[in-house]
Amino acid sequence: NAGVTQTPKFQVLKTGQSMTLQCAQDMNHEYMSWYRQDPGMGLRLIHYSVGAGITDQGEVPNGYNVSRSTTEDFPLRLLSAAPSQTSVYFCASSSGRADQPQHFGDGTRLSIL
Amino acid sequence: GENVEQHPSTLSVQEGDSAVIKCTYSDSASNYFPWYKQELGKRPQLIIDIRSNVGEKKDQRIAVTLNKTAKHFSLHITETQPEDSAVYFCAPTFVGAQKLVFGQGTRLTINP
């Protein structure tokens, strides 16, 4: 049972480039979310989804897009990378909504030069 | 939205001693109170949670206590060990909530 899988684990981008961070879960969870974690900081919600076809904004959505075409996958797109988006990105899923234990992926460490 | 604060932000204890981390929240509708542990370079993982119909829950050396009237809950770790060194996050919420707000984290260091 893989749980929540994130790819890539590490990525370096140049300012202005775009990329997609992948997140997949095999637990048939309806709720999925993306967080960013800056050094020494807590987790801040970027976007979330309560089911296929439904997404909404979190605390810090600017500069990021998401889609949820299947229950399993929840990719995060950076449209035009900026140095301020240098962070560690975590994807999470749960069987209910925010009121259930969150299962996190191992994270993607992203550096924007 | 929920306003969440953790205290202290850093905590250093001697191995074998106890550690207590407090989480205060603002939304009186909150009724689910989890604690997550994040070891250095790793993902956050749930270590214990409690719902509002229970005042205390224990799992071996860790426990969570809830004071709904005062709107805070605490993580207690007894007989601390080096592997307890990590950052701990609280994330109070309510049934049906769509967004989760994490506390800023408490860095716990266990000194041998």
Image (cartoon, helix red, strand yellow):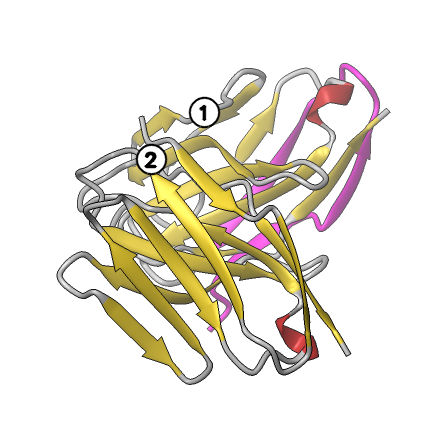
Task: Give SS at disc 1.
Answer: loop
**Chain to which the residue tagged by mark 2 belongs:** B
Q: Check the image and report above or below for A11 versus B87.
A: above
Q: Is residue A98 visible?
A: no
Q: Check the image and report above or below for B18 versus A66.
A: below
Q: Is residue A57 magenta?
A: no
**Chain to which the residue tagged by mark 1 belongs:** A
Q: Which corner quadrant of the image does residue B4 belong to?
A: top left
Q: Which residues are magenta?
A: A1-24
Mark 1: amino acid: Glu
| In-front residue for pair B48/A6 | B48
User: Residue at (54%, 61%) from the top-left corner?
Assistant: B37
Q: Is residue A56 left or right of residue B5?
A: left
Image spot of residue B109 (x, y percent): 70, 64
User: Residue at (41%, 48%) from the top-left corner?
Assistant: B23
Label 2 and label 1: CA atoms lie apart by 9 Å
| In-front residue for pair B43/B5 | B5
| In-front residue for pair A111/A40 | A40
Q: Check the image and report above or below for A76 versus B107.
A: above
Label 2 crowd bin: few (<14), some (14–19), many (20+), radius 10 Å: many
The residue where tag 1 is placed is: A59
Q: Is residue A96 left or right of residue B4?
A: left
Q: Is residue B111 left or right of residue B106?
A: right
User: Residue at (78%, 40%) from the top-left corner?
Assistant: A11
- The numbered mark at residue B99 is 2
Image spot of residue A80 (x, y percent): 68, 15
Mark 2: amino acid: Lys
The answer to whether the residues at label 2 and label 1 have Cβ atoms under 8 Å apart is yes
Q: Which corner quadrant of the image does residue A98 belong to?
A: top left
| In-front residue for pair B47/A26 | B47
